[in-house]
Image (tube, helix red, strand yellow):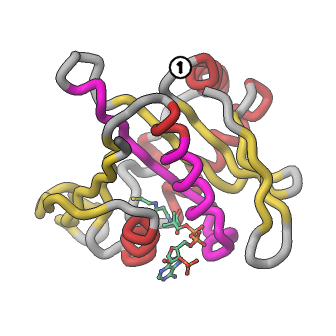
Amino acid sequence: MEYTKTIKLKDGRECVLRNGTRGDAEQELELFRQTHGQTDFLTSYPDEISYTVSQQAEYIEKKRNSPDEIELLAQVGDRIVGLGGLDRIGWAEKTRHRGEFGVCIDRDFWGLGIGRALTLAVIECARLAGYSQLELEAVADNGAALALYESTGFTEYGRNPRGFRSRLSGWQELVLMRIELE
Ligand SMILES: CC(C)(COP(=O)(O)OP(=O)(O)OC[C@H]1O[C@@H](n2cnc3c(N)ncnc32)[C@H](O)[C@@H]1OP(=O)(O)O)[C@@H](O)C(=O)NCCC(=O)NCCS
């Protein structure tokens, strides 16, 4: 899927939301590793992320050419500062109406409106791609993320008390959320 939008951040700067290109692969990978070290709320640790730049470039191409999945990046100046993704949960007839949303933003750029813009962009893409439902999981202690998701229309449908096992804090409860799109 293709998507491009320019937004104004809360501090007045411009931020471009767009598909990545092969040339963004190195910076994307660096951001992915960096963000996964900045918070204990994401699914993996930086030392578990083993993609090479060329694998990341392939991934970017695959998502760009996909009719129903997307990886969006948020760029401020020449810096990639956030990523938002839409993935199909399953290809079988019974599950292909379900999409999954994920987002990560460089901590230096939190609180500026990028998370909201990426979330709304992915919801729009999911609608365009024909999904009936978009889903996500968030750590129950991640108040900022939960507030963002609730304010963009997601509702909780359950909890997984042992969803993550953190190196730092042990079990982390996950809140399961969804939004109906049609
Ligand atoms: C959660 C995250 C995506 C929010 O992105 P962001 O760009 O900082 O959020 P925004 O500036 O767009 O704010 C959107 C909403 O989030 C909530 N929010 C953001 N920061 C908050 C904070 N410090 N405390 C409480 N709520 C907060 C608010 O509801 C806010 O709405 P408002 O602008 O009307 O106040 C970002 O903090 C992040 O990437 N965190 C690390 C990775 C992560 O947790 N990803 C989600 C995994 S489920």
Label 1, on which residue?
67
63 magenta-colored: no
- Check the image and report above or below for 10 versus 94: below
Closest to the observer, 24 or 66: 66
Residue 154 pos. (x, y %): 34, 60
The residue drawn where x is 76% and y is 70% is 9
- Image quarter where the C terminus lies is top left
Q: For residue 153, what is the image quadrant? A: bottom left
Q: For residue 100, what is the image quadrant? A: top left
The magenta region covers 95-124
- Check the image and report above or below for 107 versus 64: below
The residue drawn where x is 42% and y is 33% is 87
106 magenta-colored: yes
Q: For residue 27, what is the image quadrant? A: top right
Residue 171 pos. (x, y %): 17, 65
- Check the image and report above or below for 144 versus 23: below
* Circle 1 SS class: loop
The crowding category of the residue bearing disc 1, from other C-alpha atoms within 10 Å (few below 14, some 14 to 19, many at least 20), is: few
The residue drawn where x is 59% and y is 59% is 105
Which amino acid, by three-letter code, is at mark 1? Pro
- Check the image and report above or below for 121 versus 14: above
| Left or right: 156 as drawn, with respect to 57 | left
Closest to the observer, 26 or 110: 110
- Image quarter where the N terminus lies is top right
Identity of the residue furthest to the front in this view: 182
The residue drawn where x is 11% and y is 63% is 161
Residue 113 pos. (x, y %): 65, 69
Residue 82 pos. (x, y %): 64, 53
